[in-house]
C-alpha cells in the first residue's frame, strides 16, 4: 500500500506524481496534463488502497450489526469521521456525512424549510422563515449554493437577494453591507470562487451576517483541497465540502455545523439509523450527526476520504498552499502575456487565490479551445462551470478553466501556456 509522504515545508510534485496512477495515462500520443482538478481531483494510490482494503476485509453495515465485521466497519467509519473532522479543526460530532456539497446544501435548505413548517419543536423556531424574510447569496455562486435557496424562498415566501461583484470578480463589500440587514435570516457564500479562484472575505461577510443575526453557510469546496481550513476559526455556522475535489472518492462529502446549530436543526432525510424510538404514529431522533444520516451510509467512501485528508495532512497544507501559489502566479502571468486572452477575475495584487484560472479567447469558443487542448493531452474545463449568473455578469456564456493540485508541476503549466498561445492562430482568429 502506498503511504502518505512525510510532512515537509516544501512539496515536490514530481515525486508525488508517482502516487497517482492515472497520471501515467497517455491521451493519444501525448502524456496527460491534468488541469481539471477543480472539477474532480485525482486520487493517490493510498486512497484507492484504503477503499479496496475495507471492501475486501471489513465490508459491512455500520451501527447496526453485533457481529465482528459490523463492529470493525463501524470503528473504521467513525475513525474516518474523526480524521476528516480533525482536518477542518472540528469535533467528530460536528461532521455529518453527505454524498457531497450539493447534498449538504440541500440538507440545510430543506431542514430550514421543515423548521418553517413547525417541525423540530421550540429549538428549531430560530430557523423558521416567513414572508418578508430574506436569504442572501453572492453573484459568484456555484448553482449548488444558489438553487436550493431559490427553492427555499419559493416554499416559504422569503425573498432571495444577492451581493454583487466588482468587474474584477471580487465581492462588493459595500453592496454586501447594503443588502444584509434586519430582515436577513441566512447568508450563503463561497470561500473560493470556482470560476475565479479568488478567496472571498469570509471575516467581513460573517461579521455583517452576525450583526444581522443571520445564519452563515460556507461553500468550502474549492478551499478544502488547497488552503489550511479551520472552520471553527472562520466562525461560520455551517459549511460543506466534497471529497472528490480533495483527492478523495466520489459520492462523499462533509457537512460541518456549530454544535448548537446542528442540535437545533430538524432532520431532512428520515428513515433508519437516525432514530431512537419509533411508533406507528411518531418518531424520536438521534442527536447530531446521526440525526442527519438516514439509511445506508457511504462507508468505503468515508474511509477513502479519511485516507485523502491524511495524505494532504502529511504533505502539510501550508506546503500545499505555497506550491499552488507558485503555480497560480505562473498560470496567471502566462495567460496575461498571450494576445487575445481575457483573464476572468483579474483582480489587483494582494487578493488571495488558489491555483485556478478561467479565461476567454477572443474569437474562439470555449469548447473549441477545450478540444484543441485535449488533442494535445491537456485536460481543462469548458462551459459555465455551474455558475451561469457569474458568467452573465462578466458578459460571457462560457469560459475555459485550468486548475491545479498537489501533483501539478511547473512543466504542466508551461505546456498548457505554450498550447494556449497557439489557439487563435490555429482557428484563424484575430487576423
Image: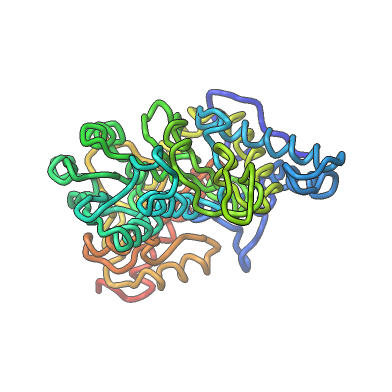
Q: Residue at x 58, y 55 (%)?
A: 281
Q: Which residue is most to the bottom?
A: 428
State the quadrant of the N terminus. Answer: top right
Residue 110 in view in this figure: yes
State the quadrant of the C terminus. Answer: bottom left
| Residue 231 x %, y % | 43, 32
Residue 329 in view in this figure: no
Residue 284 in the figure: left or right of residue 354: right
Q: On screen, 139 above or below 173?
A: below
- What colouring method underlies this structural image? rainbow
| Residue 267 x %, y % | 50, 48
Q: On screen, 305 above or below 8?
A: below
Decide which of 384, 100 is in the foreground and name it. Answer: 100
Decide which of 296, 208 is in the foreground and name it. Answer: 296
Decide which of 337, 18 is in the foreground and name it. Answer: 18
| Residue 237 x %, y % | 38, 36
Q: How many marks?
A: 0
Image quarter for residue 333?
top left
Q: Residue at x 22, y 44 (%)?
A: 184
Q: Residue at x 50, y 54 (%)?
A: 103
| Residue 425 x %, y % | 34, 70
Q: Residue at x 33, y 56 (%)?
A: 149
Residue 361 in the figure: left or right of residue 108: left
Residue 46 in the figure: left or right of residue 251: right
Amino acid at each position: 500500500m502506498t503511504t502518505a509522504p512525510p510532512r515537509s515545508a516544501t512539496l515536490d510534485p514530481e515525486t508525488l506524481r508517482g502516487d497517482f496512477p492515472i497520471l501515467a495515462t497517455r491521451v493519444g500520443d501525448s502524456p496527460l496534463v491534468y488541469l481539471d482538478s477543480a472539477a474532480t481531483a485525482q486520487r493517490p494510490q493510498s486512497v484507492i488502497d484504503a477503499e479496496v482494503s475495507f471492501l475486501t476485509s471489513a465490508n459491512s453495515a455500520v451501527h447496526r450489526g453485533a457481529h465482528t465485521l459490523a463492529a470493525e466497519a463501524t470503528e473504521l467509519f467513525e475513525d474516518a469521521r474523526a480524521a476528516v473532522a480533525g482536518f477542518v479543526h472540528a469535533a467528530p460530532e460536528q461532521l455529518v456525512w453527505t454524498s457531497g456539497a450539493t447534498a449538504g446544501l440541500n440538507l440545510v435548505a430543506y431542514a430550514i424549510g421543515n423548521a418553517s413548517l413547525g417541525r423540530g419543536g421550540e429549538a428549531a423556531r430560530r430557523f423558521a422563515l416567513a414572508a418578508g424574510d430574506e436569504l442572501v447569496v453572492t453573484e459568484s455562486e456555484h448553482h449548488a449554493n444558489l438553487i436550493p435557496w431559490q427553492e427555499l424562498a419559493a416554499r416559504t415566501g422569503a425573498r432571495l437577494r444577492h451581493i454583487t461583484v466588482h468587474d474584477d470578480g471580487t465581492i462588493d463589500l459595500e453592496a454586501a453591507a447594503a443588502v444584509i440587514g434586519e430582515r436577513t435570516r441566512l447568508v450563503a457564500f463561497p470561500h473560493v470562487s470556482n470560476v475565479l479562484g479568488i478567496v472571498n472575505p469570509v471575516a467581513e461577510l460573517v461579521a455583517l451576517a452576525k450583526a444581522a443575526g443571520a445564519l452563515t453557510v460556507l461553500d468550502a469546496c474549492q478551499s478544502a483541497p488547497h488552503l489550511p481550513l479551520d472552520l471553527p476559526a472562520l466562525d461560520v455556522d455551517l459549511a460543506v465540502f466534497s471529497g472528490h475535489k480533495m483527492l478523495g472518492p466520489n459520492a462523499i462529502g462533509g457537512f460541518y455545523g456549530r454544535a448548537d446549530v446542528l442540535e437545533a436543526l430538524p432532520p431532512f432525510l428520515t428513515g433508519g439509523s437516525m432514530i431512537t424510538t419509533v411508533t406507528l404514529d411518531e418518531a424520536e431522533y438521534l442527536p447530531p450527526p446521526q440525526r442527519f444520516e438516514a439509511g445506508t451510509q457511504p462507508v468505503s467512501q468515508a474511509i477513502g476520504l479519511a485516507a485523502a485528508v491524511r495524505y494532504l495532512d502529511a504533505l502539510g497544507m501550508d506546503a500545499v498552499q505555497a506550491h499552488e501559489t507558485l503555480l497560480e502566479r505562473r498560470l496567471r502571468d502566462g495567460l496575461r502575456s498571450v494576445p487575445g486572452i481575457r483573464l476572468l477575475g483579474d483582480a489587483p495584487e494582494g487578493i488571495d487565490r488558489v491555483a485556478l484560472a478561467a479565461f476567454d479567447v477572443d474569437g474562439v469558443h470555449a469548447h473549441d479551445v477545450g478540444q484543441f487542448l485535449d488533442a494535445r493531452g491537456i485536460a481543462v474545463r469548458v462551459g459555465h462551470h455551474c455558475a451561469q449568473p457569474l458568467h452573465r455578469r462578466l458578459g460571457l456564456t462560457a469560459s475555459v478553466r485550468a486548475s491545479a493540485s498537489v501533483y501539478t508541476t511547473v512543466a504542466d503549466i508551461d505546456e498548457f501556456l505554450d498550447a494556449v498561445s497557439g489557439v487563435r492562430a490555429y482557428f484563424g482568429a484575430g487576423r
